Amino acid sequence: MNAKKAAKAVLASVLFQTKLIPLLQHFRLKDKITILLYHRVVDGTSRLPDYSPDGMTVTKREFEQQMAYLKARYRLMSLADFVSYRLQGRRPPPGTCIVTFDDGWASVYQNAFPILIKYHIPATVFIAPAQIENRKWFWEERLRFLIAGILADPHKNAADREALTALLAEEGFKGDNNRLLPGELALLLDRLVVYFRTRPQAMRRGFIAALEAIGRAGTRAPVNPFMNWDQVREMAAHGVGFGSHSLTHRNLLTCDIATAHTEIHVSKRQIETQLQKAVTLFAFPYGKQNEEIRRLVQDAGYRAAALTVRGHNDVHADLFALKRINIHSQVAATVPFYACRILKLFDKY
């Protein structure tokens, strides 16, 4: 732990132990609505590498501690109920907190769902139906998995490593990939993900196909990452809400309007068909949107949409630009840090 993070840990602990957190909560959130964003809830004991980017996971143990804390300290409400309050002109209770999940990872069903039931916590999960059906990893995890597999052992796959170095050089990533330390590999993977998020889908697919051709053997991801429809229906039967995260989890700013229309409309219909209930909530993939995309979402019949922009929402917030606070182990590994994260006390951390 670096000195800055250690100092923040001490401060968070002091605030928590001296009972200042409830006082700060009262004044900072009196007229605010807090929406929390989770992605994966891992069991913390698996020997399988985690190929998700930073900011995507909490452990099962952390999640249970967090839910116990929320149950004791906040007024919990589903996102659908909050939207109903707003549309009816009613004011939600002060200090309302809402739990959401993006992507529909299998670990949410396996590890988070039992905890949500245990503490009677309402939650909403945003899913991309095409991911539920094809059981493939997102391209970010796929890219990380493939490159890590090629570079895992410097004494093996020399030809594959050389081919990867040449492929990376074509995209402007030049360097000696035969002697990468673990931290350097992680940095390379992060840079590649950021780079390809702004590139056309066809270009990204071509790069990953080239990686698969280089790796040949062992290029299948180790587990099926997403829930199946039976699990989705089981969660829905226990009161968990579901919304759309587009059809294929595409950045809607990088596709044409006709494709964005399909992503928004077809995902809604497919989830409604599976659950036999109206789907009225949307979360923008990667948080990417503009006025035109927001209008498409509204015209499709959704009642609200969530961003990934970090912040609280006032009682009159735009229902199609709801802010959320991302929760992950790097910023909320302890309850004091979690309590401070919700309050945005360490806003840049």
Image: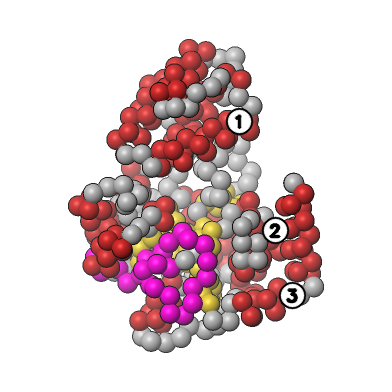
Q: Does 31 appear above or below 65?
A: below
Residue position marked by numbered label 3 in the rendering: 20
Disc 3 to disc 2, C-alpha distance: 17 Å
Q: Secondary structure at mark 3?
A: helix
Q: Where does residue 246 sit, x and y in percent of width and height?
A: 32, 55
Disc 2 element: loop
Query: What range of the chain is rendered magenta?
Result: 300-322
N-terminal of the pair, mark 3 or mark 2, is 3
- Main secondary structure found in the magenta portion: loop
* CB contact under 8 Å: marks 2 and 1: no
Q: Which x, y percent locates residue 209?
A: 35, 27
Q: Which residue is mark 2?
A: 334
Q: Residue at x 23, y 67 (%)?
A: 299
Q: Residue at x 61, y 30 (%)?
A: 184
Give whichever of 137, 230 is nearer the camera: 137
Examine the image and state in which quarter residue 327 appears. bottom right
Lateral position of residue 148 relative to residue 226, left or right: right
